[in-house]
Image (cartoon, rainbow, N blue to C red):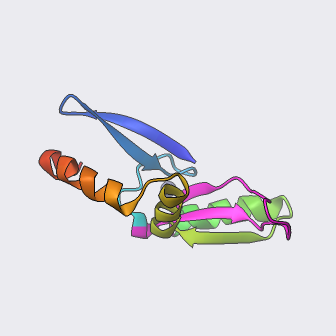
Amino acid sequence: MMLKVMRKNERTAPLVCCNVCGSWIDDASLGAAVFAHLGFEDGDTQQVQLVHKGACHDTAEAQLRTKGAGVSWQELKRYLVDALHNSGVTIDTLREMQEDEEKFGRL
Ligand SMILES: [Zn+2]
């Protein structure tokens, strides 16, 4: 997962960036979370690559297949929402923070 921060109007703006091309994924519906197949035991984990759909997604899958892995993926929007949930970020927290986000607008 490639995470970056950008300076914007004297604020620090977190960005999710593509593991293949390095540029910002500015629309989560146009991104994917790509990973090798999980094993069959609860608790199995795999590293995830966050990528743009299309050519970057194809490249990430090809790299995993070269290593002999089967490949799975989720849409980035789904992955991020689930990851926030599993990190204890509730919908109430998101609602509380939305007011602050709207004050400064989107990048
Ligand atoms: Zn990319």
Residue 12, image x and y in percent?
Answer: 30, 33
* Front-most of residues 27 and 23: 27
Q: Answer left or right for 91 relative to 71.
A: left
**48 left or right, relative to 32:** right
Nearer to the camera, 90 or 57: 90
Residue 93 screen position, x and y as percent? 34, 54
> Which residue is depicted at the point 45% across and 67% down?
77
Q: Splitting the image into 4 quarters, where does residue 42 fall?
A: bottom right
Question: Which segment is the magenta one?
Answer: 29-53
Residue 71: in magenta span = no
Which one is in front, 45 or 61?
A: 45
Q: Would you identify the image quadrant in which residue 67 lies?
A: bottom right
Q: Is residue 5 above or below residue 102?
A: above
- Residue visible at 74% across and 56% down? 46
Task: Please tell me in which quadrant of the rendered image residue 98 appears.
Answer: bottom left
Q: Position of residue 82 (x, y in %)?
A: 52, 64
Relative to 18, is 104 on the left or the right?
A: left
| Rendered residue at 42%/68% (across/down) | 30
